[in-house]
Amino acid sequence: MTTEFRHFNGGEPIDAEALGAAVQSHLTYTLGKDAAHATRYDWRMALSYAVRDRITDAWFAATRKTYAEGAKRVYYLSMEFLIGRLLEDALVNLGLADAAEAALKAQGLNLMEVVCDEPDAALGNGGLGRLAACFLESLSTLGCPAMGYGIRYEHGLFRQSFEDGRQVERPEHWLSQQHPWEFERPEARFRLGFGGHVEHVDGRAIWHPAEVVEAEAYDTPIIGWEGKWANTLRLWSAKAVHPFDLGRFNHGDFYGAAEPEALARTISRVLYPDDTTDEGKTLRLKQEFFFTAASLRDILRRFDSEHDDLALLPQKVAIQLNDTHPAIAGPELVRLLHDERGVEFHEAVRLARGCLSYTNHTLLPEALEAWGEGLFAHLLPRHMEIIRRIDEDHAAQYPDRASRILDHGTVRMGELSFLMAHHVNGVSALHTELMKETVFSDLHRLHPERIINQTNGVTPRRWLKSCNGALSDLLTETIGTGWVRDLEQLSRLEPMIGGAGFIEKYAAAKRENKTVFGNWLNEEFNLNVDPDAMFDAQIKRIHEYKRQHLAILQTIADWQAIHDNPNGDWTPRVRIFAGKAAPGYVFAKEIIHLINDVAAVLNADKVTREYLQVVFLPNYNVSLAERIIPASDLSEQISTAGKEASGTGNMKLALNGALTIGTLDGANVEIREHVGAENFFLFGMTAQEVVARREIDGHAGRAIAECPALGRALEAVRSGRFSAGEPDRYRGVVENVSGPDYFLVASDFASYHAKQAEVSAAYRDRDAWARMAAYNTARSGWFSSDRTIGDYMSQIWGAKSLL
Ligand SMILES: *Cc1c(COP(=O)(O)O)cnc(C)c1O
């Protein structure tokens, strides 16, 4: 937390005393607590309410201005929002951090401890959900009239812990305490149907759903930088239409009486803990339709309150689909316009397409959503008819089209999204090109102007200003505060990187962050790390394509090499892992277990542990990322080329001065271009080479034969060196890497291993390393989500800033 800001937003000036009084007042009158008995939780709530009050005026002003100007609104539909904590974000964006610190100090409390009392709102799995959260903050910072729409899951992403090194999942109860940031909107409710049948009378379709639930809105204001604008995140909660069956209750059937409510609420009960595979569950499709349909009703209701000509829809409404999860928006909007408002069918399709655009996030075949036609038609019979007509009309128009929405008994949501969107975007330059060549090659040929690229970004408020106080203070002292809003101003550091004064301070800031992090590791996990060792971080979801197993095999090889020559001049390293595996993803869980097993052996090894330690931190989430990133020296971005769509963790780490060791994948390519090839450790095959390598018979076996270090590391795992008493524990991992090895761990090992040796050598020249790190910070300005959102506004949405 930094110190240079006072307050920004237009309301009454507020100092520590006034904020303190507001906190006191909420403590007394909102929470009903006497200061003498107030807990940390009470103080956090009181502070949150006092801060929320400061947001509300800007929020109302933004809404009034949007109506007054008849401005186009952007609607961001996303199944996931990984927002994390909100108090610190609000304090920093309002410039109230100092005032809050002083106000709490007067009560004998520490602001950071109060801030950390807030549970993470983990309504997402990983990168996709975090992107949506960064986008919301940038939309507000840029003053773009916008609204995020999603689901208010009662249980966010599971809480991860380890038992004997194995991942254990427990439900996350983020709502077990009051959530001070949201406003319940009981008046904003919509009824939504599922199932039933469709009746056709006089050319009109009437859907008679078999089941009806209610969606109720909860609004969270999202404040932008300097409190100048605030948009809304509107999350839907499912409720029963008739929550309680008094008749059954009076007959003594108490469970039965509560059943309708329990069933309806199931829809917003849990976040699916898997971001890459289609669970194939009716409930998942229900969730998708539930939040998408409720959002569209809400959008049309708002449109109707301002306009009476539906032809204006594309000029006033931009709807962004974050991946295919809200793809049902296409047919549902057509249904609302055609069936319910009487717009001619083709005109309804044209209007819907004029509003909709779609972001693709993955090329992994198993992650491209497809539903069985039977299941789909059963749940959404009218939508099935509309999709069939859209598909047939398009095929008639383009007779040489090869791919279809309805294909071999499935409904393909990627094709549907493409056909119903005016623009389709990838999330990094490489991913966008691969999208044109692979998943959408056929449709791209027919609609060559539709696919464009929008490389992801991260918000510098959370991912630099508030998470890295030491570096932020140095940046502000050196180039002023403009970088927070205009991150490319970081390039003004460049002339100073050559000289001595700045780089010493830059290195000192990193050293300070590492000490803070090391102390925290000590307090929380009883771990001792040396802040002079290299902190080497691989923090992200656990997935074969992200290749945590490549990193741990390489670690084993290093450990063996140190053992061979314990008096060698080794560069000390702490390898830090964090990340969750989807509960049903057996291989990913084995990787976690293996890393923990390796950590136990290595950390207990008196010969090697001064050079090499392994730490797997449990329960990776936004708050943990905010701790690890400022303290990291090395960023592991080692996915199989062609598989990581963009990555955003890579951007956060580079911005905070970690050097990347990475493949030419996703946004790594652009990071390397920006920071300079000499400040980036590149290894591994390219996406093309990956495809060619897979064609070689026995590619893994050959790679192992050519790389003794890999053979030896695998042998240690195979022999049970890390799983005493159970030598077969990792047979699956070993056999995979030595056999099919689809993700080419073996084939990329030698290149990775050699590059890691270069990294270790480079780290020994601390001055040169600090300069390379500083170039990473100075040249990462382009990766601000403000840049990304500015481009979406001008190139896709046609939306304007109202600031
Ligand atoms: C940034 C972030 C991610 C995305 O990380 P990648 O390395 O891009 O996969 C996932 N989870 C959390 C909590 C994050 O903050």
Image (cartoon, rainbow, N blue to C red):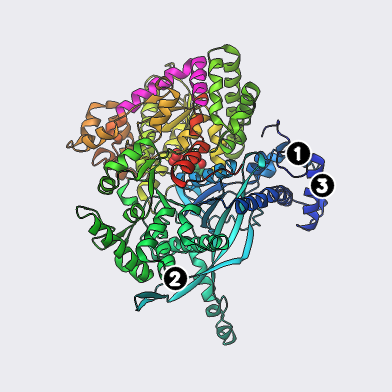
* Residue 691, label in figure: none
* Residue 127 highlighted magenta (yes or no): no
Residue 410: x %, y % from top left? 28, 61
Q: Is residue 538 visible?
A: no
What residue range appears in magenta? 750-777
Labels 1 and 2 touching (C-beta < 8 A): no
Q: Gap in Å between the C-alphas at discs 3 and 1?
A: 11 Å
Q: Is residue 533 above or below residue 75?
A: above
Sequence-first disc among 1 and 2: 1
Residue ranking furthest to the top: 499
Left or right: 178 as drawn, with respect to 142: right
Per the image, the residue denoted by label 2 is 340
Residue 312: x %, y % from top left? 48, 57
Task: Point out the image quarter for the C terminus.
Answer: top right
Q: Gap in Å between the C-alphas at discs 3 and 2?
A: 53 Å
Q: Is residue 355 above or below residue 777?
A: below
Residue type at mark 1? Ala
Residue type at mark 2? Glu
Q: Secondary structure at mark 3?
A: helix
Task: Point out the image quarter for the N terminus.
Answer: top right
* Residue 21, label in figure: 3
Left or right: 198 as drawn, with respect to 261: left
Per the image, the residue denoted by label 1 is 99
The response on whether ligand 1 sits within 8 Å of label 1 is no
* Residue 762 highlighted magenta (yes or no): yes
Sequence-first disc among 3 and 2: 3
Left or right: 741 as drawn, with respect to 238: left
Labels 3 and 2 touching (C-beta < 8 A): no
Residue 397: x %, y % from top left? 24, 56
Q: Secondary structure at mark 1?
A: helix
